[in-house]
Image (cartoon, rainbow, N blue to C red):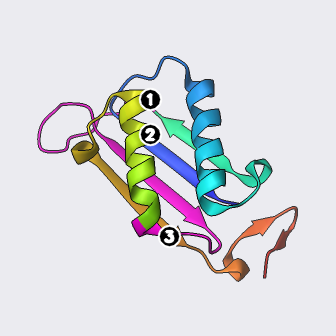
Amino acid sequence: MPYINVSTSAKIEDKKKLLEEISILVSALTNKSKRFVMAKLDDNSEMYFEDESPCCFLEIKSIGSLNPSEMAKPISDFVFEKMGIPIDKVYISFVDVPASMWAWNGRTFG
């Protein structure tokens, strides 16, 4: 149950590889099993952030285990390394979801 949604104006050639790699990163940063990380990628999206150069917006949701001040840099570095998007063109939203508002396998976590 961490969920990461990546929206970018860049075109990603190997989408499956990027999704797997970012799942591993989020798993490590949240200390949650990769088995429960869901990742979504919307690439080649029409986006504008100061100008029309490539940019990226990431939304990370989890039940606890989020530490934005420690997670922002490694995630931004990942986006730069894997997508070539400068970190000043990256926004990240962290959302801590109550266990009672997140369901899996037919029931909520809390």
Question: Which label was assigned to residue 82?
Answer: 1
Q: Which residues are magenta?
A: 43-69
Callout 2 amino acid:
Phe
Does the CB distance between marks 3 and 2 fall below 8 Å? no
Compute the Cα span from label 3 to label 2: 17 Å
Question: Which label was assigned to residue 78?
Answer: 2
Does the CB distance between marks 3 and 1 fall below 8 Å? no
Callout 3 amino acid:
Asn
Task: Give yes or no for residue 92 being in the magenta stretch.
Answer: no
The image shows residue 23 at horizontal and vertical percentages of: 63, 44
Query: Which is nearer the eye, 19 or 107?
Result: 19
Q: Secondary structure at mark 2?
A: helix
Q: Is residue 16 above or below residue 31?
A: above
Chief secondary structure of the magenta portion: loop
The image shows residue 31 at horizontal and vertical percentages of: 68, 61
The image shows residue 5 at horizontal and vertical percentages of: 52, 48
Q: Quadrant of residue 50?
A: top left
- Where's the N terminus, which quadrant? bottom right
Compute the Cα span from label 1 to label 2: 6 Å
Callout 1 amino acid:
Lys
The image shows residue 24 at horizontal and vertical percentages of: 65, 43
Determine which residue is flagged by label 3: 67
Q: Earlier in the sequence, mark 3 or mark 2?
A: 3
Name the residue: 37% across, 48% down: 57
Number of residues whose C-alpha sits closer than 10 Å to that of mark 1, classed few (under 14), some (14–19) or many (20 or more):
few
Compute the Cα span from label 3 to label 1: 22 Å
